[in-house]
Amino acid sequence: MGNWVTVFKEKDRMRAELLRNELENNNIESVIMDKVDHNYPILGVVEIKVLESQKSLAEQIINDFRIDD
């Protein structure tokens, strides 16, 4: 199992899910780590993690996704 690195942080879970879907469509394995305090939803973030070996490609896709936004 490889090392996982954080490539994106966001407060909006839906936006993070859309981005994770875009990564998966480009054959990049990714996971979402939900660090939102559900008692106080304004606190915390959702992180997207990818394998370290796919980090640079994931960052490129994320940048393209933000431009299209």
Image (spheres, rainbow, N blue to C red):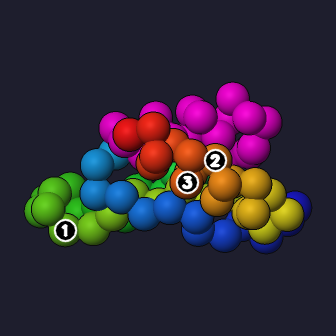
Q: Is residue 49 magenta?
A: no
Residue under numbered circle 2? 61
Give the residue displayed 23% in from the left and 63% down from the top: 37
Which kind of residue does numbered mark 3 sit on? Asn
**Which residue is at 46% across, 46% downward?**
67
Choose the circle earlier in sequence order: 2 or 1: 1
Q: Which residue is mark 1?
A: 43
Q: Mark 2 Cα within 10 Å, few/some/many (few <14, many 20+)?
A: some
Q: Position of residue 32 (x, y in %)?
A: 52, 51
Outermost residue, front side: 67
- Residue 8 placed where, x, y %? 50, 61
Range of residues picked out in magenta: 14-30
**Left or right for 52, reference 60:** right
Q: Measured along the vertical axis of the image, is residue 65 above or below residue 26?
A: below
Find the distance from the CA under tag 2 to the CA under tag 1.
27 Å
* Distance in Å between CA atoms under marks 3 and 2: 5 Å
Q: Is residue 27 magenta?
A: yes
In what quadrant of the picture does the C terminus appear?
A: top left
Q: Is residue 54 left or right of residue 7?
A: right
Q: Residues within 10 Å of mark 3 (few under 14, many from 20)?
A: few
Q: Do callouts 3 and 2 mark residues in contact (Cβ within 8 Å)? A: yes
Q: In the figure, residue 5 lies in which quadrant?
A: bottom right
Mark number displayed over residue 63: 3
**What kind of element bears circle 1?**
loop
Q: Position of residue 30 (x, y in %)?
A: 66, 48
